[in-house]
Image: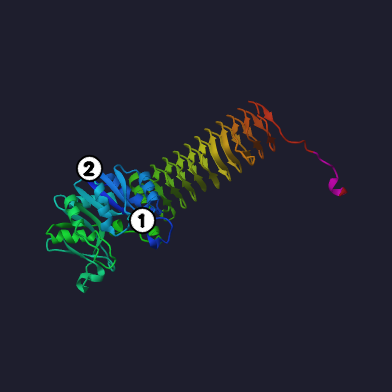
Amino acid sequence: MDQDPNPERGDVAAIVLAAGKGTRFRSDVAKVLHRTAGRSLVGHVLEALRPLGLGQVIVVVGHQREDVEAEVAAVGVPGSVTVVQGEQRGTGHAVQVALPALREGIDRVVIVPGDTPLLTAATLGSLLDAAEGGVAAMLTAVLDDPTGYGRVLRDGHGAVDRIVEHRDATEDERSVGEINAGMYLVARGPLEDALSRIDDRNVQGELYVTDVVQILTGDGQRVAAVVADETHVAGVNDRWQLAAAGAVLRDRHLAHLAAEVGVTIDDPASTHVDVSVRVDRDARLLPGTILEGSTVVGERAVVGPNSHLTDTEVGPDATVHSTRADGAAIGRGASVGPFTHLRAGTRLGADTKAGAFVETKNADVADGAKVPHLAYVGDATVGAGANIACGVITVNYDGRTKSHTTIGAGAFVGCDVSLIAPVTVGADAYVAAGSVVTDDVPDGALAIARSRQITKEGWVGER
């Protein structure tokens, strides 16, 4: 994946602006907590910062602060802390709130929005490199249609002269396509000084971090500008932009898997893989595949078509066809599907089979065991080499409590059997088709739990 080539910068801190509500999302959830491609918006930003090896990451929180703080902790970037912006008075005010939390030894500060999920470590690395030996640098982008964005005007030496907002720009200035991306790197001392001099004399009555650039250039300080790919610095302000960002992130990840790992993806347009998912060499993803969360797909495994796996491990050489799995583990060489549902706690061993219309839950199925079709195995242990025939049900719930079923190694459970838990079927035991088993079956025994057939000759004609 896209990585920063110089990953140790302990004298640099990042300030992530993540206090806003995001009214255009029309949501009860804070903007930066909305998720796409497997992570929250702020989670994507933090993961872009992780490879940089920064000395500190300060996340400014406000709206739904407890939830955002929990998300920052869950992402777990080293050196990350949160500070509270109780009253949101603009980006400049957010940075002011963060300054007292800076540690000793921090000499430079990078400022990034918390709603830019397409940001990459390499893009941030170029910003950090551009400021080497200078006071400040900022990221810009060149747009075909920059309407509404602040324009970046450069001096004769290529440095930033000033930033002018669209509404304040002249016609000539509006013809400039380079816009402010809202990401900055500033030396700590000059940043603290400039922030002490900004004011809220503007239409919104807020303190803007862009004014820091104006102050620095007004003082004769050089501010370098680095042109970034516009897709890397794009913010997300509503749900449509969230969906668009997710598509870009998934495309990046699929391209990485295909080009750098060696994964075959038959139809990228219909294959959705979260950026948090690992897929190993020579695996194949068929159309309609959705892989989410912490899912791992092993070498040479085939997933799809039409399979949806969340937080699921697929072992090498396994096949998973038309399956929904959540919190499951599928062993090496296992065969799953079609139309199979593996619920949380399912553990399929090596060379197992969970076939058509099989549902499992909290089930440990040992190596070589087979549940070929039309069965429910819940709260159960199935021994190695056992065979669970068509229509078998482990009856694990009596209306009040869940109970466990144990099926021994090499056992055979015939068609249309109900095993009333708690119950044990011993190793190499047989259960006759149509049985309702309420008592344990010893090793090597045959259990028949059904009434004798009664045939009444001529019954139909008599009626």
Circle 2 is placed at which residue position? 10
Specify few, some or many for label 1: CA neighbours under 10 Å numbering under 14, 14-19, or 20 or more.
some
Task: Give the image quarter of residue 297.
Answer: top left
Q: What is the three-letter code of the residue carrying label 2?
A: Gly
Circle 1 is placed at which residue position? 248
* Residue 106 appears in the picture as rendered: yes
Specify few, some or many for label 2: CA neighbours under 10 Å numbering under 14, 14-19, or 20 or more.
some
Dot 2: element = strand
In this rendered view, identify the residue nearer to me: 110 or 429.
110
Q: What is the three-letter code of the residue carrying label 1?
A: Val
First in sequence, mark 2 or 1: give its number.
Answer: 2
In this rendered view, identify the residue nearer to me: 6 or 46.
46
Tag 2–tag 1 contact (CB < 8 Å): no
Q: Residue at x 54, y 35 (%)?
A: 365
Disc 2 to disc 1, C-alpha distance? 31 Å
Q: Examine the structure image and report whether residue 459 is included in the region drawn in magenta.
A: yes
Q: Is residue 135 above or below residue 146?
A: above
- Residue 121: percent from the left, percent from the top? 27, 49
- Residue 114: percent from the left, percent from the top? 32, 54
Q: Which residues are magenta?
A: 454-461
